[in-house]
Amino acid sequence: MKFTKQIFVTSPALPPIEEYVEHLKDIWQSRQLTNMGRFHQEFQTALISYLQTERIDLFTNGHMALELSLQALNLTGEVVTTPFTFASTTHAIVRNGLTPVFADIKPDDFTIDPKSIEEHITDRTSAIMPVHVYGNVCDVEAIEKIAKKYGLKVIYDAAHAFGVKYKNKGVAQFGDVSCFSFHATKIFHSVEGGAATFTDPDFGRRLSRLKNFGIKSPDCVDGVGANAKMNEFCAAMGLCNLRYVDEEIKKRKKITEVYREILSPIEGIALNPVQKDVTPNYAYFPVVIDERQFGASRNEVMEALAENGVVARKYFYPLTNTFDCFHGEFDAAETPVALHTAKRVLTLPLYGSLSLDDAKRIGEIVAGCGVG
Ligand SMILES: Cc1ncc(COP(=O)(O)O)c(C=O)c1O
């Protein structure tokens, strides 16, 4: 039976409106709407504890956290990264005048392959930019070793990895900097927003100036910065949502279990892995469909879902190294695992307010496309 109301790949969690309204009253009273006010400060303090990081800075969005972090590191030349990601990762590199060099991903968890990273290092490489894609933790130990060996900076795109832990350590603790997205489509959001976590206080000072036009003091502007300050309305929304994020993660875990029960026995459908030593956040439910074994292609499954009122998404397709804006500068054949995955991956709806019955129905529609 077709869903009467369309089901999208995600739907944002919202706090009880009264809680947000209480914060709005405070904003009305103070008339401080932006420029690092009370809620910006409170949100930062709360996140330092939740993400288990030493230092943090907040941004208008995750992209500006990435872009300005690269700038604050004063990088030059090439940055080794993954093409199996959202546009933001690659654009942050290119918009800094740096050259992205694409390493391949691992077929099991879709994160950047350390072996491939090492193969792509040249004397122009200044940094590695891996992505904890779908909240899957990169091989942080191998990446740290490579970075030390070659003297490279590591900037983690942790947009998907809010609340994820590796060996009980928040992912915010890995690399020189980790950048999170608090976009409304993410597991945790502040409508729009983002954060960078790091330990080096000098880097932190440069970064915080860059998000405010490079202004050091009323008499001194020492960086070509942007305006990427998080406003008070977003910070207040983030503070409210933070109180409920653990509940959201628990609900998503249950939905994930429903999908897994239906889809894991099916030949030709590979599920996102359960990673060893990782506390996951259940941010996404990607499936990789092998048409020859399953009997239907990714696009056919997507169409069958759409006919039933379910909007699944091809995260991540196309690969960023095939984007039109790069005019054929890169060759996706050089990242064959990423290319193979991007052609077959489909991300199913997953959000806390999705009912278990609806998840079951979606899983059955997918399963029903196959030959078995
Ligand atoms: C992997 C990845 N990196 C960066 C971003 C950018 O985050 P934002 O939308 O908050 O700018 C996103 C999501 O939007 C993302 O999925």
Image: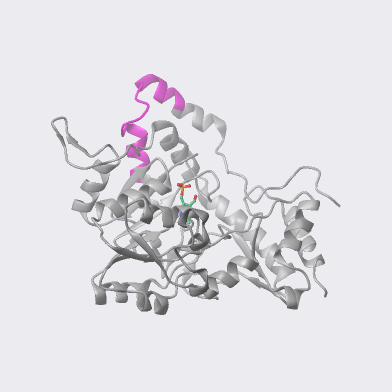
Q: Quadrant of residue 125?
A: bottom left
- Percent coordinates x, y for residue 37 in the rendering: 32, 31
Does the magenta stretch mainly form a helix, a strand or a loop? helix
Residue at x 55% of width, y 57% of height = 283
Q: Quadrant of the C terminus?
A: bottom right
- Percent coordinates x, y for residue 124 in the rendering: 27, 68
Residue 31, visible in the rendered structure = yes
Is 311 left, or right, of 251 in this rendering?
A: right
In front here: 88 or 351?
88
Is 327 left, or right, of 302 in this rendering?
A: left
61 w.r.t. 73: above or below: above
- Residue extending farthest left: 219
- The colour style of the image is one colour
Is 305 left, or right, of 80 in this rendering?
A: right
- Percent coordinates x, y for residue 69 in the rendering: 31, 52
- Percent coordinates x, y for residue 351 in the rendering: 62, 51
**Magenta segment:** 24-45
- Residue extending farthest right: 1
Residue at x 39% of width, y 32% of height = 232
166 w.r.t. 239: above or below: below
Is 271 left, or right, of 221 in this rendering?
A: right
100 w.r.t. 189: above or below: below
User: Quick check: is 202 in the magenta stretch?
Assistant: no
In front here: 287 or 298?
298
18 w.r.t. 256: above or below: above
Residue at x 62% of width, y 63% of height = 286
